[in-house]
Image (spheres, rainbow, N blue to C red):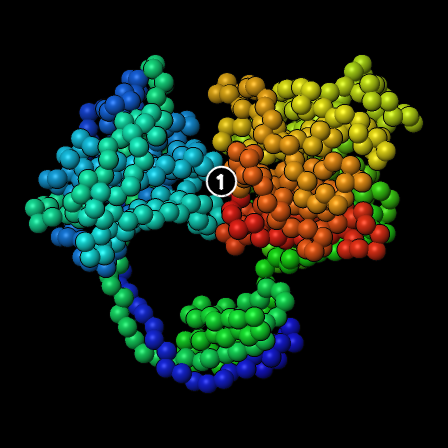
Amino acid sequence: MISKNNLAVIALALAAGVSTSSAETLLWSDNFNDDIPIGWENNSVAPFNEVNQQFVIIGSFPPTPLDNPRDAIAYGRHPIALASLPDQQTLEMRVDLAGANQNDALAALQFFWAPEYQGYLLFKDQDEVWLVKMYNGTKSLASFFWENLPLKNQNVTLVLSLTPRGSDLRITTRVLDKDNANAVLFERTVTDTLQADPVLPSGAVKGFKGEPDVAGTPLPGENATAYYVQLALTWGNSENASQPAAEVIFDNLEVWQYESPQLAIQNAVVLSWPVTQGEFVLESAPSVSGPWDPVTDAWWQTNATQCQVTVLAPASMTLFRLHHAGFPSYIPFDRAQGEIPEGVAMDQAGNVYVAVGGPGGPRNGQIWKFSATGESSVLVDFGTPGVTGLAADSLGNVYVTRDVAPHQGVYRVSPDGQAVRLPGTEQIVFPNSLTFDPEGNLFVTESFSFDPPLTPYGYTNYIAPAFGRGGIWRIPPQGTAELWLRDDLLSGTGSLAFLLPYPCGANGIGYFENALYIANTERSLVVRIPVLSSGAPGTIETVAQVPDPDPSFLAFGPPVPDGLALDVQGNIYVPVVNRHAVIRINADGQAWTTLATMADRLDAPASLAFGTTLAERTSLFVTSLSMVPGFAGPSLIKLDAGIPGGPLP
């Protein structure tokens, strides 16, 4: 048939399809709605109880011993009605982590068996995920992995899955976002084998003593008489001082067993069509009038020219179509209407926001909102030029910098388009880009200041010494903006005076592993500023001189970086405006690659931001200002970085 996108989808043949089905059994669950924990056992380190229909563990720990962190763990454990771990069947434990009262309070979901007291623990706090093997009667701990990731620490689900495969045990860990349809925030799988498997060396995890993995079965032996699920709290800070009381809150614990899949034969339809530009969803319906539903049971095969899919087709699926879906890879803007895109950000629902801030035209000074499939609307119209940087929080609010007096500052725009200037930000002379840290602090780059204060934008001649240094401002949650750091490495040089009526220093900004990374436009640098535990700035340092992706443009001066983004590995992404390229600099600053060029229709790229939804985690959204007459023009382009970006705080 012909779909509404005018694409022919042709049924080639009926085929015999093979499908699988697997039985799932809920072995045990506890929603903690009782006044007391029934059937739970605890240790003597700290109490646990059921409070407000949740499982709460509170502990005041002494200094954590680096050689034996087990001495600083409080837990509650409950037996599971399990006879064994059958081969090729998955045992899965899920528990909601409702929250923790401080960053280093490590919540743990654990499975183990007695009398060996061997098992596996999944730890999670504000910025760490840690998988540990416990053996030798709890006397030994081996760390399979430890990831330092700034993940949210409330309203998430911890998942620990164990699947025996012959003599091996496959262990899958996940962190799911309950506020975002259980989107996967973290997933990693390891295999424990009969051999001594690679584990992290002792001291690799905050200095804690770890043991090597030893040869031997990773599975319960014939002597295993009892199986347990355990919820625990431990302290993840090795400072040599007594720690404040820590608390973690769990809810909705479930233990499932998934049996081996069973094979079945049923009818299938094979569909084929030419490769088509754009993103589409295959849908089916019993008639032309619908209802049209996405096809889920299918096997896809594609090559350079042809797409082919085999669909398990019940009687209700008689018609098929391709329906356009997903965010488009290219969105053009109209320069004549003042549509010059600058800042870009994506919220957790998949909406992309663009600051339209070019000179002239009726649409200058607007924030555009694009849905997850590319439909556009105006979120807010400030009515005056000078909207620049964007960021989004986990509640759907958008934060925008405005750089033209008397409206300069940082504005919070609610989902319904109401804009409010944050207190204290009117002091920022030229606010540019912004980013959040995991605690919700908003950091803003100030590309230049006035020292002594001058009337902004009241001058006609650009004299660099009349301008002060660039800096970083910090806005605490519900607080007032304060100058956080001012430094020469955040200041411009005046090298772009032929183009800009002001020096441009600190520009793009991002956060990764307790540090801010900033692109300095005129110095062509990426610098790093540690964020100390007190919240104060550490010593600023240069990470990299921005490399030149195309020296043939040397007549236009050295590379001019603008925005900045980071992926989950700490790699740094920078748009180079006067080279029409986006580059990726390794986390150590020692190597780099070109990610996109004019061949990808980049035309003076300005800002960039990673996608935040599961479907767009590796997507990099880039705005192009357009500086090449007759070329691509202003646009929003979606690139594939191949590596996920960090999540929203």
Q: Residue at x 70, y 56 (%)?
A: 599
- Between 293 and 300, the residue placed more toward the observer is 300
Mark 1 neighbour density, 10 Å: few (under 14) some (14–19) many (20 or more): some
In terms of image quadrants, where is residue 72?
Answer: top left
In terms of image quadrants, where is residue 240?
Answer: top left
- Between 629 and 362, the residue placed more toward the observer is 629
Q: Residue at x 92, y 27 (%)?
A: 460
Q: Residue at x 59, y 64 (%)?
A: 279
Q: Residue furthest right?
A: 460
- Between 544 and 259, the residue placed more toward the observer is 544
Pinpoint residue 572: horizontal percent, then vertical percent: 58, 38
In terms of image quadrants, where is residue 382?
Answer: top right
Q: Is residue 605 visible?
A: no
Give the side of residue 444 with respect to residue 171, left or right: right
Q: Which quadrant of the figure contains the N terminus?
A: bottom right
Q: Residue furthest left?
A: 223
User: Mark 1 highlights which residue?
Assistant: 569
Give the side of residue 627 with respect to residue 442, left or right: right
Task: Give the vertical position of 429 relative to 548 (above or below).
Answer: above
Pinpoint residue 4: horizontal percent, then vertical percent: 64, 74
Q: Is residue 64 visible?
A: yes
Secondary structure of the residue carrying tag 1 is loop
Disc 1 residue type (three-letter)? Gln
Task: Give the vertical position of 487 relative to 106 (above or below).
Answer: above
Pinpoint residue 567: horizontal percent, then vertical percent: 53, 41
Task: Give the vertical position of 572 relative to 92 (above or below).
Answer: above
Number of marks in the image? 1
Q: Residue at x 62, y 47 (%)?
A: 594
Pinpoint residue 527: horizontal percent, then vertical percent: 61, 28
